[in-house]
Amino acid sequence: MTIRILPPATINRIAAGEVVERPASVVKELVENAIDAGAARIDVIMDDGGRGLIAVSDDGHGMSPESLDLAVTRHATSKLADDDDLLNITSLGFRGEALPSIASVCRMRLISRLPGAEQAWALTIEGGDRLSLAPAALAAGTRIEVRDLFYATPARLKFLKTPRTEIDYAADAVKRLAMAYPAIAFSLTTDGRDLLRLEGVAPGLLDSPAAARLARLGAVMKRGFADNALIIEAERDGVRLTGHAGLPTLNRGNAGAQYLFVNGRPVRDKLIHGAVRAAYADFLARGRHPMVALFIELEAHSVDVNVHPTKAEVRFRDAGTVRGLIVSALKHALAAAGHRASTTVSEAALGAMRPHLAPQPLLGSGSGYRSLNSGLSEAAMAYGAPLDAPSGRVETAPDNEAYEAYPLGAARGQLHATYIIAQTADGIVIVDQHAAHERLVYERMKRDLASQGVARQGMLIPEVVELDEPATARLATRFEELAELGLVIEAFGPGAVVVREVPALLGDCDIQGLVRDLADDLAEYDDSLALRERLEEVCSTMACHGSVRAGRILNVTEMNALLREMEATPHSGQCNHGRPTYVELKLADIEKLFGRR
């Protein structure tokens, strides 16, 4: 077997496979170069999902003809200090691989002009071969055109997705960089259509970095993020954390709306994602993810960005400090939010109320009437349908008026023995009594456990719960830990347990359902983990069974007491599964529904 040195063209294409995964990789690298060049505006154009054309223009400091030629030479860079210290990286790029790697798999034209120079210069490259360097026309700055991407490596073309998908990847790359640099204007045009256009934030906002960043985040993340974001600001051992985190009720089905930055560099780091997940574990159901944008700043020597050619991964010298800072800062911000829930909840409720000018025709059915459509307004038109039983109650207490000054108002009634209706000074609040009380019980259990322990209540007649043998065995290994949480259980034969004491907070709860759910939960836990390490899940299960159930009729005193406790309890804006506990509708919005405004 003969060992030989590969030719430069082959080496470049191998390197390109690491750096240029898809059109979005090209966009990311070229936009990062523009940011490093001090650009105030960056414009991206893509055709055919990036296969036909990717053009990135900026108004940065530009390059001389000599620098143009060096820019496409492997490992040539202007971004490292003279000592070549790879642990002191202050720019987005530094490896000197991006341009030569891209040039080796496409037809590229680089046009650049230095400020004050008489003319611009253009370098043409095809498949890594320099063809010409000639004068050109361009204002100060740089424009890089990439055509026929992967024509030199046709196998890579087969792995690309549809043009729409590739555009989405590229748009995500631009958005991430735009979040980190709100002073820069960005645009992305595809096939002649503006897909993204972000102007630099107003000069006045630049004096307030947090306000400038939030303005840009709101422009990019939409969905009311700016109105429902909590400010994150903390520092520990030289690590500074800033940014914004959405309320738990503002969540999504995937982690795509979690944006993480280290020293201005967009990264995807399992450590940081895990810290975010841990901070929100108490508030969101499985499969739901918060919306956050977190910015970590620390000494360059404390983080290694030279992990992967794409520079999307980092390693921290003290990963524990970073993770602990994120978890504590997020939990502190969520606790400070109190009972607040996101405004998108009320917006969704208002959006479901679709007023119509004329009633919908009703169709007869066996026992009444039904509407042709199922919207709230259509259902409301079926007022003539017979009712089996009253579904709402109205009560008034003599001192009820004074409660309207409270954030969640004064209880005015109960609907379907499930929802409390309260009147505030400028609107109404609808509370899900089960979800709200579930959160309150849960928070009380955590407080008791952290202080003097969970108070127990002995059962007059112990209750036997029949289970299968594996479930009984799982519970038997955790009897002592469950007792610490206020639930005293003993074995009662091979396929049953007997419950002798329950947490006093749970009151008259569903013992059978509680024990069976706990047995099911234990099947998913690692046997090496103590239940205290899974405190959130265990207490959440108990709280769900011990809270006020839907269908229970409350008097006005009980309803007001629930509202007041919600106001005084952190995180009461959402239940243990991340669903909202209440919806607030402003009077002005209600009046618009009826054409009064």
Image (tube, rainbow, N blue to C red):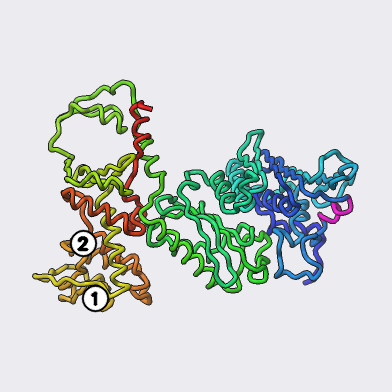
Residue 362, x across and y down, in percent: 24, 24
Q: Please indicate whether residue 242 sits to the left or right of residue 10 in the image.
A: left
Residue identifier under label 1: 483
| SS class, disc 2 | helix
Q: In the image, is residue 213 part of the stretch drawn in magenta?
A: no
Residue closer to the observer: 415 or 20: 415
In the picture, which quadrant includes the N terminus? Answer: bottom right
Residue closer to the observer: 17 or 158: 17
Disc assigned to residue 361: none
Residue identifier under label 2: 513
Residue 465, x across and y down, in percent: 16, 68
The amino acid beneath tag 1 is Ala
Vertical comparison of 520 with 37: above or below: below
Question: Disc 1 or disc 2, which is closer to the eye?
Answer: 1
Query: Image point 67% across, 71% down: which residue?
Result: 301
Vertical comparison of 66 with 350: above or below: below
Q: Give the range drawn in magenta.
A: 65-72
The amino acid beneath tag 2 is Gly
| SS class, disc 1 | helix
Q: Mark 1 or mark 2, which has the lower sequence index?
A: 1
